[in-house]
Amino acid sequence: MLFSIATGSSDPIYRQLVEQARRLIAAGALAPGDLLPSVRDVAQALAVNPMTVSKAYNMLEGEGLFQRIRGQGMQVAGRGERPPAREELLRPALERAAQQARELELDPESVLSLFKKILKESK
């Protein structure tokens, strides 16, 4: 299955699907012209309401990342559309981390130092 959900996440399911699709497109795992699984198939596989999947697909279509093809369903938009920058995909997580750092009254230098350390650990 192309998508998955984190049931314990505070993010709504439709938002999880939107973020996953953006990441897949930015990483090249979804290429222009690729057909997407139907709303019904995704909803069944994830055991969620089809309206949730439809909402995510509609949001992505509104952003120009997906396009509806009559008789075929949704596909990844053509090359004329600009995929999201990878940095922008990371922004929500960094905004949450920045908010937590402010709440903990940490200075920016120590937060950046910790982030650099974490980046090096994951390699």
Image (cartoon, rainbow, N blue to C red):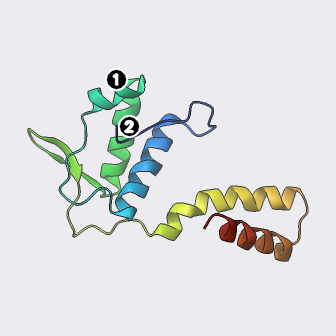
Q: Position of residue 61 (x, y in %)?
A: 30, 50
Task: Label 1: state its secondary structure.
Answer: helix
As drawn, 77 above or below 111: above
Residue at left offset 88%, top offset 71%: 107
- Three-letter amino acid code of the residue under disc 1: Gln
Separation (CA) of disc 2 from disc 1: 15 Å
- Three-letter amino acid code of the residue under disc 2: Lys
Q: Position of residue 38 (x, y in %)?
A: 24, 34
Q: Quadrant of the N terminus?
A: top left
Residue 3 quadrant = top left
Residue 115 quadrant = bottom right
Name the residue that disc number 1 marks.
44
- Local crowd at mark 1 within 10 Å, few (<14), some, or many (≥20)? few
Q: Nearer the viewer, residue 64 or 92?
A: 92
Task: Label 2: state its secondary structure.
Answer: helix
Name the residue that disc number 2 marks.
55
Of callouts 2 and 1, the N-terminal one: 1
Q: Nearer the viewer, residue 84 or 6?
A: 6
